Image: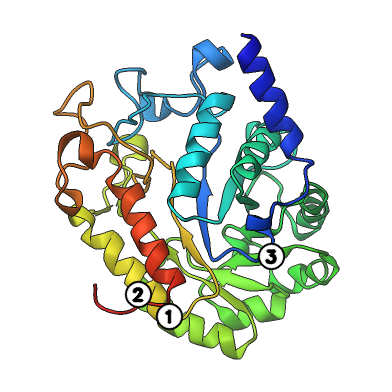
Amino acid sequence: MRARILLTLLLVACIFAPASASTVSRPRIAIFYYPWYGTPAHDGVWQHWTQNGATPPRVIASNFYPLRGPYSSGDVRTLDAQMREIARAGVDEVVTSWWGRGSTEDQRLSLVAAAARARGLAVGLHLEPYPKRSAQSVGADLRYAAGLGVRDVFVYEAELIGAEDWATVLPQARNVRVFAHTRLVGWAKRAGFDGIYTFDASPTIFRRVCSQARKAKLACAPTVSPGFDARRAVGTASVQPRRNGATYDSRWRAAACARPDLVTISSYNEWHEGTQIEPATASPPDRRMYQTYNGAYGEHGRAAQRAYLDRTAYWARRFDRGRACASS
């Protein structure tokens, strides 16, 4: 218990610490992170693992099963281990999902930020479409984020608010880069955004969108993903298979060839949508119910559990050396 208290104090203190040398320059690779999971042992109830009628710990709202098992995003030891994995994979920035002031994600923001900064990672916000979100409320959110030392804010589904409304608040943003989730570069320019990110768009548009963004003097941050499978969480029939890692590789190469300012990864741990690269167990509770990473990049069993983190490190090295667009 004493060790846990000391670790908590250390991580919370880090949120107010100056940025380390490794976070001074602008990030080149950012990853979307979801801090919304909870367990009865840590939080009193299951949080998020129970979507669509799932009954943890055996049955969770995912087609994969975490190597850690269903965990709490409020557990500082889990957070520290996750941020260590992210940093070792060559990622520079953690972009944490945020659903407005007072939300569970807001309450955990300080812990996530402290854990990230303790590992030399910059912190960004993924500003979700929380109830009654408006340009004016986001203006206040940006000031709040800047006060916490957040450098980048990514506005999901930015087009839900008109460009004219955005243009009244974004010019007032200080010390924060604001990215719009949109494919419409001209719209983002009129709205006053600093850049765009694609999130769930096809990689076939990366080159065109980034070319348009450069001409408009906007930053371009295409999003790469290993696949998509949300059947167990929300019943969505559409699936983008991982193809043993080939999907992730092709998207990384497409992003790099678009000459981006920043590559974003979806995601570290969005287990509901099956986009996660967080380690997944090779021995789930029910092999008929869950997929595994077996076969990814030729790995099997325990070696495959971290296959996507290892591959992220590979692409991060190639990207930093300017070789990610070349054939591997």
**At 42% from the left edge and 70% from the top edge, which residue is drawn?**
319
Q: Quadrant of the C terminus?
A: bottom left
Question: Is 291 located above or below residue 265 in the figure?
Answer: above
For disc 1, the marked residue is 258
> Residue 257: which quarter of the image?
bottom left
**Residue 322 falls in which quadrant of the image?**
bottom left
Residue 178, numbered circle = 3
Residue 71 on image: x %, y %: 45, 24
Q: Is residue 128 visible?
A: no
Gap between marks 2 and 1 measured at Cα: 6 Å
Q: CA distance from mark 3 to mark 1?
A: 20 Å
Closer to the camera in the image, 94 or 60 = 94
- Residue found at x 23% / y 26%: 284
Q: Disc 1 on helix, strand or loop?
A: loop
Do callouts 2 and 3 mark residues in contact (Cβ within 8 Å)?
A: no
Point out which mark residue 254 bears. 2
Which of 66 and 235 lies nearest the eye of the viewer? 66
* Amino acid type, callout 3: Val
